[in-house]
Image (spheres, rainbow, N blue to C red):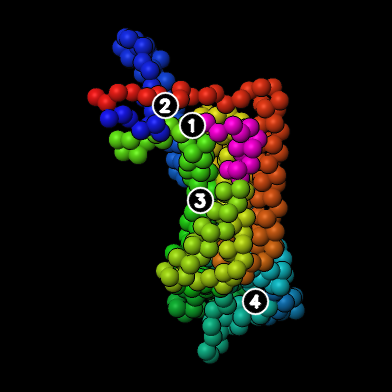
Amino acid sequence: MTRPKHEATEPTIPGERTATLRKPLFWAAPIVVVTLLMSLLAALYLGSILDPKGSLRNFPIAVVNQDEGDVAPGSDTRENIGNQIVDGLVSGVPADKVDLQQVGIGQAQTMLDSAEVYGAIVIPSDFTKRLMILASSSVVPGDVEKPIITVYTNPRAGTFGMGLTEAITEPALAAVNEKVGAQLSDQVAAAVGDTPVAGAARLTLANPIDALTVQYKPLPDGTGNGLSAFYYALLVILAGFTGAMIVNTLVDGMLGFAPTEFGPRYVHNPKVEISRLQTLAVKWGVMAILAPVVSGLYVWISHLLSMPLPNALGLWMYGAFAIAAVGITAMSILAVFGSAGLIINLIVFIVLGLPSAGGTLPIEATPAFFGWLAKFEPMHQVFIGIRSLLYFGGGGMAGLTHAIAMTAIGLGIGLVLGLVVTRLYDLKGFHRGVAAQPSEAPAS
C-alpha cells in the first residue's frame, strides 16, 4: 500500500526539530507579536471610551431662538429674554467642547435629519410674552403656564450622543433658569413695591422656565436603540476582511502555493504555473462574486429578525460594494506583504477601525487622535453609509454620498496597489516558491 500522491510527506533533517525548538526567536517571535498587538488593542479601545466628557470637542448642538420679545410689566421697554438665554448658553458652555450653532428652525430640522447635530435647543416665539404673563400672575390672580424651552435629542445620530446632549443642556439651562428667575423676581419686586408676593409665586418666579427634553424622530423597534447600524457596518467590514483571509488561504491551497489541512489530513496540491498578478486577479474575482451574495444574505437575515429596512435595495448594493472594496484591498495587502499582511489588515480594518467608527461613542467625545483616524478609516466610512440607509432614508447629506466616495477611493487604492506591486514582483522574477512536491513513500 502506498500513500496517495496528493498527500505530501516533507523531508526532514536529523536533529532539525530539536535545534529549531531551542532557538530563542522561535519562542520570542509569536509572544512579542501577540503581546504588542493585544497591548495596542487595549490602549486604543480603553483610551477611546474611558473619558468622553474630558475628550469632548466641537460637539454640535443647534440653538433656535424664535422669541419675538414683549413689553415688560410696568414699563415701555421691549425685552427679548430669548436673546438673553442664548447669550447665557453661549457664555456658559465651553466653546472648545460644544459647538452651539445658532440657526433657524428649518435649518435645525435639516441638520437633525442629516446627523449634522446631536440635538437642538428651541426657544418658542412667545417665550418672553409667557414670562411676562407669569410675572403679572404673581400679583394678579389667574391661570398661567410656565414658558417651555424644548431640547430635541437626535437618537438616529447615536444613542450615546443623546446622553451627552442631555448632560450638556441640563446644567446649562438650569443656570439660565436661575438667572432669568432672579431677574424676573427683581422686576416683580420693583413693580409691587411694599406689597408682599405670595410664597408660591416667589417659588415659581425663582424657576420660571420648564425645560422639556424630547426625541426628534424616535427610532422604531428593532434597531437596537440605535446600535443596529454600527453592528451591520461591523458585519460588512468583517465580511470583507475575514472573507479575504479565507479566500486567500483556499485559493493558495488549490493552486499549490500553500498546504491545506483537513483534520489529520495534510494536503499540498501540485503548484499551478500562474503569475502573482494572475493569482491576485483570481482572488479578486472570487471576492467580486462573493460580495453581493453575502450582502444579500445580510439583508435577508435582517428581514427575518424584523430589523426595519427602509431601503433594502440600497443597503444590499452599498453592502456589496463595501464588502468587495474591503476584501479586494485586504487581498492586495496580503499579496504585497505576504504573511505580514494579515497583521496589517487586522490593524487597519479592526484594531484602528473599531474605536474610530463612531458607532457607539460620538467621534467628538473621543480623543482627537480618533477623530483624525475617522477621516479615512474604512469602518467609519461604512458606518455612516449604513446609518444613512437605515435611519435617514439614504439621504446623501446624511453621509451616504461621502461613504460611497470614500469606499470608492479605498477600492481604487487597493486595486492600484495590488496591480502595480504584483506586476513589479513578476517583472523582477520574484515568483512564488515551489514547495516540495509529494513523493512516493512506502506504507508504514
**Is disc 3 surrounded by few (<14), some (14 to 19) or many (20+) residues within 10 Å?**
many
Q: Nearer the viewer, residue 63 or 374?
A: 374
Residue at the image point whose x is 48% and y is 56% from the top: 231
Label 2 to label 1: alpha-carbon separation: 8 Å
Q: Earlier in the sequence, mark 3 or mark 1?
A: 3
In the displayed structure, 323 sits above or below 332; it is: below
The reply to whether the magenta stretch includes residue 19 is no
Q: Quadrant of the N terminus?
A: top left
Which residue was labeled with disc 1?
270
Q: Earlier in the sequence, mark 4 or mark 2?
A: 4
Is 86 left, or right, of 344 in this rendering?
A: right
**Residue 239's mark?**
3
The amino acid on which the numbered mark 3 sits, given as a three-letter code, is Ala
Q: Secondary structure at mark 3?
A: helix
Which residue was labeled with disc 2?
438
The amino acid on which the numbered mark 2 sits, given as a three-letter code, is Pro
Contact check, label 2 and label 1, Cβ < 8 Å: yes
Q: Which residues are magenta?
A: 270-284
The amino acid on which the numbered mark 4 sits, given as a three-letter code, is Pro
Residue at the image point whose x is 68% and y is 55% from the top: 404
Q: Position of residue 281 (x, y in %)?
A: 63, 42
Q: Earlier in the sequence, mark 2 or mark 1?
A: 1
Contact check, label 2 and label 3, Cβ < 8 Å: no
Label 4 to label 2: alpha-carbon separation: 82 Å
Task: Quadrant for residue 148, please give it.
Answer: bottom right
